Amino acid sequence: MARKVGSVGAETADKVRLAAVSLFARYGYAAVSMRQIGREIDLQAGAIYNHFPTKQHLLRGLLVEHMERLLKAWDLEEDTSRSPEEALVAFVRFHLRYHVECGDDVFISYMELRNLEEDNYAEVQKLRRQYEGNLRRILDAGTKTGVFHIGDLHITTMAVIAMLTGVMGWYRQDGRLSLDEIEAFYVEMVTGAVGMKED
């Protein structure tokens, strides 16, 4: 049975996205041309423009889709019945594992944010703030119940996010510690940073 034209088009667009992620992660957005992306998947550059009118459209799509997947993944993980302490531990573990598993996407989402045009930048930043808001609510709830001791909610939120995302700069699958051990270490650091005391 022949594939529908739409399914072939979607498959091609997916191949373009995957090739772009790999090339942007290796060489940077500015250094990669649409022609180079096409060569990576044996596709004429003109065919790419059928799916992505410009390289900027492609970058915007990659960053927006990454944030939307991240938000959806946390929605599936989130459990509103958790205490603030449990929710914070769950967020730390989720953020680390997700970012390790989606390394190139995460790398591009941070390194290439500066290359977005103004409207696209604002769109991605809105999604980033939405994700950061999940951690902010957890920290705020814990502060209000007295289990966290935080001087500035905004700064603490951003510092924790930066600490967790920083694992991408040095984590190696074949490294000295397993991901489980690294998660446990980060849980200890983050809970200590917000003044959470163990029972």
Image (spheres, rainbow, N blue to C red):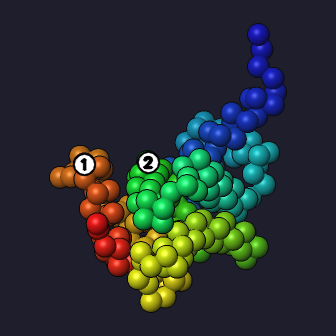
Q: Nearer the viewer, residue 8 or 69?
A: 69
Q: Are marks 1 and 2 in contact (CB under 8 Å)?
A: no
* Disc 1/disc 2 C-alpha distance (Å): 14 Å
Q: Residue at x 65, y 55 (%)?
A: 68
Q: Relative to residue 100, is residue 113 depicted above or below?
A: below
Q: Nearer the viewer, residue 23 or 85?
A: 85
| Residue extending furthest toward the bottom | 151
Place of residue 148 in the rendered image (x, y in percent of width and height, measured from the top left) = 42, 77
What kind of element bears circle 2? Answer: helix
What kind of element bears circle 1? Answer: loop
Q: Residue at x 44, y 89 (%)?
A: 151
At label 2, the amino acid type is Glu
Q: Residue at x 58, y 38 (%)?
A: 41
In this picture, residue 141 sits left or right of residue 96 = right
Q: Nearer the viewer, residue 71 or 105?
A: 71
Image quadrant containing the C terminus: bottom left
Place of residue 69 in the rendered image (x, y in percent of width and height, measured from the top left) = 61, 51
Q: Which mark is residue 101?
A: 2
Q: Residue at x 58, y 66 (%)?
A: 134
Q: Which mark is residue 37?
A: none
- The quadrant where residue 66 appears: bottom right
In this picture, residue 143 sits left or right of residue 169 = right
Place of residue 125 in the rendered image (x, y in percent of width and height, measured from the top left) = 65, 72
- The quadrant where residue 150 appears: bottom left
Count neighbours of disc 1 (C-alpha within 10 A) and say few if under 14, some if 14 to 19, many if 20 or more. Answer: few
In this picture, residue 48 sits left or right of residue 112 = right
The residue carrying mark 1 is 178
